Amino acid sequence: MDLTTELLAVLLAGLGLILAVIAGTAARRYHDARLGGVAAALALLALIGGLALLNQLSPRYGGPFAVAAIPLGLAVLAVALLYIAFVTNRPKRPSN
């Protein structure tokens, strides 16, 4: 078991799931199909993280789901950038 890969898999699964819930809620609230697509993509990233974690914890059952540390790290970075974009406030517009 590789601790770095396990940590990245947990981060990807957790952040992906949190953002999928945020995007899904926004899609329902604003009736925007594009946000629904983003929610589905983030849910798939969370699933990849979960399956990679299954591979690390139980190689017997999760053998086909092996993901190397570098692709996991890139996926975590992409999801973290989306997380920052979702939770930061927009800059205030100057009033005329």
Image: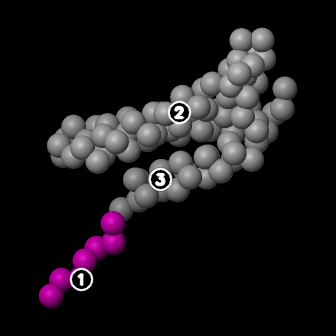
- Marks 2 and 3: CB-CB under 8 Å? no
The kind of secondary structure element at disc 2 is helix
**Kind of residue at disc 2:** Ala
> The N terminus appears in which quarter of the rendering?
top right
In the image, residue 14 above or below residue 72: above
The answer to whether residue 18 shows anywhere in this view is: no
**Kind of residue at disc 1:** Pro
The kind of secondary structure element at disc 1 is loop
The answer to whether residue 88 shows anywhere in this view is: yes
Residue 92 among magenta residues: yes
Label ID, residue 46: 2
Q: Residue at x 61, y 46 (%)?
A: 76
Q: Position of residue 42 (x, y in %)?
A: 46, 39
Q: Which residues are magenta?
A: 90-96
Side (left or right) of 2 relative to 19: right
Label ID, residue 60: none
- Which residue is most to the front? 64
In the image, residue 35 above or below residue 10: below
Q: Residue at x 76, y 42 (%)?
A: 69
Between 80 and 54, which is closer to the camera in this rendering? Answer: 54
In primary-sequence order, the first of circles 2 and 1 is 2
Between 42 and 87, which is closer to the camera in this rendering? Answer: 42
**Kind of residue at disc 3:** Leu
In primary-sequence order, the first of circles 2 and 3 is 2
> The C terminus appears in which quarter of the rendering?
bottom left
- Marks 2 and 1: CB-CB under 8 Å? no
Q: Which residue is mark 1?
A: 94
Q: What secondary structure is the magenta-colored segment mainly? A: loop
Tally the marks. Answer: 3
Q: Residue at x 69, y 45 (%)?
A: 71
Label ID, residue 82: 3
